[in-house]
Amino acid sequence: MSATGKPLQPIIIKRIKKAGHAAHGGAWKIAYADFVTAMMALFLLLWLLGASTEDQRRGIADYFNAPVMVALFGEPGARATITPLPGGGMDLLRPDTPLETRPEQTQEQRNDWALRQALMQYDRQRVEDLRLKIEQAIQANPQLAEMSHQIRLEMVQDGLYIQIVDEQDRPMFATGSPLVQPHLRAIVREIAVSLAEVPNRMSLSGHTDATPFGRGALGYSNWELSADRANAARRELMAAGIPEQKIARVVGMGPSQPLLPEAPFDPRNRRISILVLTQDAEERMTRSIAGAGVSPLSSVAAPAAPAPTPAATQPPTSPPPQGATLGSVALPPLPSLAPPAPAGR
């Protein structure tokens, strides 16, 4: 107690310990940047509205209100009123090159297009099923199964490409002539059974190797021989029940399209090709021939009877599997003009 008799008051000393502050967040900077960007966009928009004319603003509004395809590719009628804004710069609304003007399709045209696509898909599937059917028929026939390595089936752009390939010890034709051998007749007639079940038309072509034959290009050569052999295959198909109307084209390719380009003298280059055309491929071929001033397909099929005089062939520039159209017409067989044949033809 103190001298006066009063109790002493305790002395309290407060010591404040200063600690480090927590890190301040930077979220306000992002919000501020968004605000500044929005204000800049606002003033830029106000400036553009003041600098553009009524027609320009209407054109911009039409651009953003148009359907997606018009917005992406443009519509010539709508773009005629759009001009670059003052100040220069590239006009992003105009393409570098003018686009083809295409009228808007009607519902009927769109339905026709969809129907055509469905029919093309169905036709393609039918040709693919034909390939499987021919493969099964070959395997089911013991005689043809032994020669299956001489029969090649391939789906190409224009349809089913069937190749019957020659062999050194089993030639398809008599040496240097279009005389059909029995095993080729068996193959062609077995294939014809399946071909008769589809309405698709066919293009036949004959091929030879590069061995010189006959009197060269001015006489009876590989060109005439290949055309005669293609015609012989056509006659075998017709004898098996294929109507003449289904033969779209018969051509002689000579040695121009070897199966083995690295070995032009190989006997496997001698072959008969049957291209079963899809409907689309047949229409394209018809347009191509009609555009070249040649008679329609129905008139270029080879005649059933041989003619007494040769017809000239024109070598094609591309093989049928790549979808090329050939301008050659069918050639009748010319057995009376063939000279004595060399060995190995």
Image: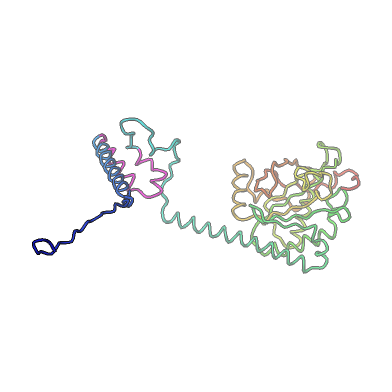
Is 5 positioned to the left or the right of 120 in the image?
A: left
The x, y position of residue 290, in whole percent, is 60, 44
Per the rendered image, the range of residues in magenta is 51-79
Is residue 276 inside the magenta stretch? no
Residue at 64 percent across and 45 percent down: it is 295
Most extreme residue toward the top is 87
Image spot of residue 264 (x, y percent): 81, 44
Please name the residue shown 62% across and 40% down the image: 292
As drawn, is 275 to the left or to the right of 109?
right
Q: Quadrant of the N terminus?
A: bottom left
The tally of labels here is 0
Residue 4, horizontal then vertical, whole percent: 8, 62
Residue 58 painted magenta: yes
**Vertical side of 243 occupied by 325: above or below:** above
Say above or below: 110 vs 223. Answer: below
Q: Is 41 in front, or is 210?
A: 41
Q: Quadrant of residue 95?
A: top left
Residue 259 x %, y %:
77, 48
Judged from this view, the residue extending furthest toward the front is: 3
Instruction: Work out whether 334 lies above or below 87.
Output: below
Q: Is residue 61 left or right of residue 297?
A: left
**Image quadrant in which you'd find residue 276:** bottom right
